[in-house]
Image (cartoon, rainbow, N blue to C red):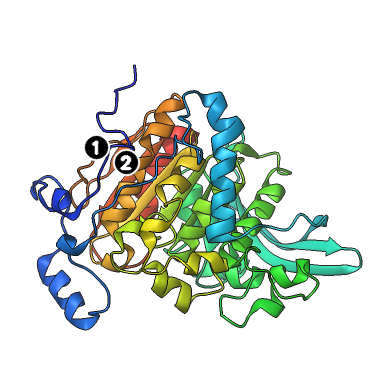
Amino acid sequence: MLIPIVLTIATMMFTARASISQDASSSWQADPDLVEKLTRQRREFNYVESKVPTYTLPDPLVTRTGQHVGSPKEWHDGRRGELLDLFRDQVYGRRPDTEYSLRFEQTAEVTQAFDGAATGREMKAIVEIGERSFSFPFVVFLPNNASRPTPAVVHINNRYFVPLATALEKPDPFWPVKMLIDRGYATASFHTSHVDPDKKDGYADGIRAFFAGGDPPSDTAWRSLSAWGWAASRVLDHLETIDSIDAARVAVSGHSRGGKTSLWAACEDERFAIAYSNNSGCGGAALSRRAYGETVGRITSSFPHWFCKPFSNYAGREHELPIDQHEVIALIAPRGVYVASADEDLWADPKGEYASLVAAAPVFELLGKRSIESPRMPPLGQQRIKGQTGYHIRSGGHGLGELDWGLFLDFADTLLK
């Protein structure tokens, strides 16, 4: 039996005072010395809980016309599509509906990687529209000794491309291939900038310009985060062709801007069974209305290629957004969502990242799934898993390493194995 939620989104007020009243012995709290240091360094940004504005979150289960969503059918047939359209038009942009063809080429292979434990392949995805083509590379590793089709993780690498040879010779905690193989997962990874350059003036060289035939993007056209998520889906297209992978058990993962992307990728593509967001912050898991650390104004001015133009209109006016990031998590329900934060990464607003999971709980409940609903964050270093959602906050700063991966896989095991 599902445990009823005491507070609904319609009545829940997420205030700074409520946050700081939590028992520090059982709930994570930001280090006061770090808060003071960051405040001195960047006075234009807020790191003080008492200065977080009081706000009310939009209810994911109330339509724009004020109708309450009371059944899974009403969610799937109406409200979910309404929310998707709001995020497409106000935050991430709309993907084109241009017809294209897709094929894959293998450019390298090692059949006995990691002392025979895996097969590694370097691949190229080739997208064609008429006589024009665009391609990007990715790498796939498959367990050799599995007795049945395995789950898989598609990793959106926002730092660099890891070629097949490098993955074999230089283990990288940002994408720990051997750990994934040893845990029974296939995995694939691509570099974001190979799909759409991660810079303000990179449009002409990316997939978005390719689809637009070189024309400039409209205000609501897809931007880089959506384009990178689209590429993750194309990698999944390839994984679906591999008999040794169970394509119904594939997670998508990312760190920082890659974490923002993994969440949106899973919203747009319901084939992804889990979305893993690591230190994703503003425009990812963190609630925009908290205006804590990085804000809508800062992120849209520094990275205008990530989000469609209307999102920048809410700079300093986050309370006017018709949606907030808890509804991105709600859009992934009833599938799995895992969110991870870091103790020193206040820029990404750990409290706001965790609060999104809590605020999405009514949608999971409506769809018959359990999820995290306690407003009290877990202590530092303690993982929390409930049903379809999981969370941890570790010590250290902005980054992704084997500790994060291990905890995520502990969660993934509960849903994919």
**Labels 1 & 2 near each other (Cβ < 8 A):** yes
Q: Is residue 237 left or right of residue 250?
A: right
Give me the disc on residue 358: 2
Q: Residues within 10 Å of mark 2 (few under 14, many from 20)?
A: many
Q: Is residue 336 left or right of residue 44?
A: right
Instruction: Mark yes or no: residue 344 visible.
Output: yes
Taking the view exactly as shown, the residue that stands out farthest to the right is 131
Q: Quadrant of residue 375?
A: top left
Secondary structure found at label 1: loop
Q: Position of residue 326 (x, y in %)?
A: 40, 47
Q: Position of residue 72 (x, y in %)?
A: 52, 25
Residue at screen point 56% across, 73% down:
305
- The residue under label 1 is 374
Taking the view exactly as shown, the residue that stands out farthest to the top is 1
Q: Position of residue 40 (x, y in %)?
A: 17, 81
Q: Nearer the viewer, residue 186 or 8?
A: 8
In the rendered image, the vertical position of residue 118 relative to residue 50, given as above or below? above
In the rendered image, the vertical position of residue 42 relative to residue 300, given as above or below? below
Residue at screen point 18% across, 61% down:
49
Q: Nearer the viewer, residue 144 or 272?
A: 272
Q: Quadrant of residue 242?
A: top right
